[in-house]
Amino acid sequence: MSVAWKFPDAPNTACFTTTEVLNGAPIVLVSHDYEGDWQFHAASNETMLSSVKIVCLADMIRRYDLLAELHGLPCGWGAQRDDWAGHWERFKDKPFPAFAEQGYYLEDAVWLSRYLTDIEPPPAAVRDALPIGACVKRVFRFAAEDGARGDGQCERMWVQVTGIDEYEAATAAQSRTIRSMRWPAMATCSRSTPCMWQILLVNKIERTRHAQ
């Protein structure tokens, strides 16, 4: 590449796009989701399984050099514009997963500890001061938030704190700290079956498009 590589991700990082983009359509929506995946979308809603393509990040930057302006876009953020000539407008995605969108949500371990003796969350002072790089165990529930509880709905997985994001809470005039996390165990599981991974990928892209 003719310019210095500024992205924290390696040039050969796999990212997701569609046939329409690779055929030359302008990219008007970029997503850098909480799992760290990059998505590049054109204006249409082309998200059929056959249209999803996996390309390396460097190839996308080579094709569309204006994407280089987004090298500092954090995980959990996106950027959009009206056309080729427009400026990127950055926006923050919702910080927490929801069952309707991701197919799971994160349980409240403090609440669960009232009913399960083997769950012992650390004190609030420890939880609020977790440093980047710390590993914590989270409880994922694969059922609707208000759905009836049953066996086999939850799974405990270790995640790593990968960033700290300060933002103004929408419902209170005070600053909250949300920590972005990485759960490689889930990613590895999804990618171990290519067909299922592609279906999950299409669902992820559709959620990103329809959220706008």
Image (spheres, rainbow, N blue to C red):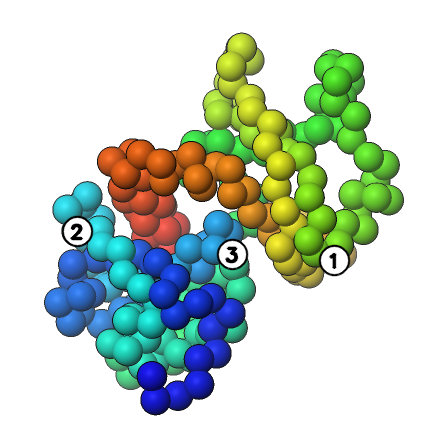
Q: Nearer the viewer, residue 191 or 203?
A: 191
Q: Is residue 111 above or below residue 14?
A: above
Question: Are there few (<14), some (14-19), or many (20+) residues within 10 Å of tag 3?
Answer: many
Q: Is residue 87 above or below residue 146?
A: below
As measured in the structure, the alpha-carbon distance from the residue carrying label 3 to the one carrying label 1 is 18 Å
- Residue toward you, 204 or 93: 204
**Mark 3 or mark 1: which comes first in sequence?**
3
Q: Residue 76, labelled with which disc?
A: 3
Q: Residue furthest top?
A: 151
**In percent of the image, x 35 and y 58: which residue is there?**
14
Q: Could you tell me which residue is drawn at 51 percent across and 14 percent down? A: 152
The picture places residue 171, in percent across and down from the top left corner, at: 67, 49
Mark nearer the N terminus (2 vs 3): 2
The N terminus: image quadrant: bottom left
> Which residue is disc 2 drawn over?
51
Residue positioned 44% across, 39% down in the render:
188
At x 20% / y 65%, what residue is drawn? 21
Which quarter of the figure is the C terminus placed in?
A: bottom left
Q: Is residue 141 visible?
A: yes
Instruction: Give the amino acid type for the residue marked by disc 3 in the picture.
Output: Gly
Q: Nearer the viewer, residue 65 or 195?
A: 195
Where disc 2 sits, the SS reads: helix
Spatial CA distance of label 2 from label 3 is 24 Å
Which comes sooner in the sequence, label 2 or label 1? Answer: 2
Q: Disc 1 designates what residue?
A: 175
Against 137, residue 149 (above or below) is above
The image quadrant that residue 17 belongs to is: bottom left
Q: Is residue 73 left or right of residue 157?
A: left
Report the amino acid beneath label 1: Ser
